[in-house]
Amino acid sequence: TLWRIHVRPTISIVFIILMLATTIAASAIELSADPPSTRDVTLEEMWRLGGEDEEDILLGVILDGEIDAEGNTYLIDRQLSQILVVDPDGELVTTLGREGDGPGELRNPHGMFLMDDGAIGVIQGFPGRVTIINGDDTPGGTIDVGGPAEEGGFAFILDLEKCGDRLVGVYGRGTMDMERGSFLISNTLAVMDMEGNTQAEICTHTQEDNFQKPVVDEAANFAEYDSWAARGDRVYTIPERDVYTIRVRDLAGNHATDFTRAFEPRVRTDEDKDEISSGGANFRVVGQDFEVERKILDTDPAIDALQVASDGRLFVRTCWDVRKLLPTGTAARYDVISPKGKFLEQVTFLVPEFDKENDQLVFLDGTHFLLLRNIDQAQAAMFAAFGEDEGGEEEDLGDAEPLEVVLYRIP
């Protein structure tokens, strides 16, 4: 009897300790409401390509880039369906890939990641596939993402990141029921192996739309992967639209913790709502136009974007720091959070003559950034060439400034 009395409390204490440890591991880390410090940084130019004075290099629409350990930069050109490789001095070394649907060929690529052997994984949104191009411009095969074609419908890829020997990204599948007049789309943020096989699903969002009476509902359409990032062994998502909360998971999908901060989202003006409501008022299915009903919320999403630096620091852009709200000459502003959840600082990046109407700063690794000068005009020209100009009216783009790409770094 004495033995039993002695052991039972011991087991209970161990159980309680384990439960507390689990609870603590997944508990939220509260960030300070105000940044502990603020810093303005004028970025230092390393090189530039394109622009009106460039005659030897043709740029279409550059969307994104990657930089390797040797300082070479890889630029993805969606319009010309190729990868430009630029050395640390800004010299164009080579171009990889070409437009087409065969081995090693690309069709409107929108993203990429670097492989360990020097090859490049190039992401095509629809039809969804990853094309591998070797460093010598030979085909390296493909990666199938999102399940086999036998599942029906059509598959697409929104984005992918390489994390060690895994892939993390959002893929989806859509099906159309013409009899019901409905369109079903399911998107999943998942961790995959390097063959594209899903190992852990982080979150899934499914919605069904009636394309005869289409509705864009901001509240219903919100998904946790609307803003996400991954690096190393961590995946970051935004579980709530109107709250400053960053969810942290491991590559097995386990919830590790949340980073939270007291925060007031930006209230939209009537002009903001009108602009959102008028954007893409109609859409077309099998040659027929349908008017879209739009249910617009009163506030912007609290967090606009997440990025992770090569050293694991998290860069968070809030709704108050989007491009259109920044002062002249300010290219970006981020909250910087350590991997362990410490609010380090708020940093503002300054670029001389930055035009917030047409220019965009692209985050690379937390030290290097790409400035896409005149990117909005370049994209408008590309969509006009595809016959996708907004509103169905031709726009005079004869005076559009050519795209220029500038690599900057933190000095």
Image (cartoon, helix red, strand yellow):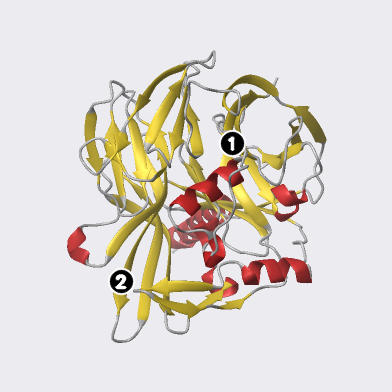
Query: Can you identify the residue that label 2 sits on?
Result: 175
Name the residue at 48% across, 30% down: 66
Q: Badge 1: few (under 14), some or many (20 or more) residues near its Cα, within 10 Å? A: many
The N terminus - image quarter:
bottom left
In the foreground, 306 or 153: 153
Q: Percent x, y for residue 90?
A: 53, 17
Q: Amino acid at mark 1?
A: Phe
Name the residue at 52% across, 58% down: 389
Q: Which mark is residue 363?
A: 1
Q: Is residue 15 left or right of residue 103?
A: right
Q: How many marks?
A: 2
The answer to whether residue 185 is above or below residue 364 is below
Q: Percent x, y for residue 273?
A: 71, 70
- Which image quadrant for residue 207? bottom left
Q: Is residue 167 left or right of residue 392?
A: left
Name the residue at 38% across, 46% down: 108
The C terminus - image quarter:
top right
Query: Could one spot residue 21 in this view of the protein?
Result: no
Task: Work out how far the residue at label 2 is from the one at label 1, CA to CA, in angstroms.
Answer: 34 Å
- Which image quadrant for residue 315? top right
Q: Percent x, y for residue 199?
A: 31, 51
Query: Could one spot residue 277 in this view of the protein?
Result: yes
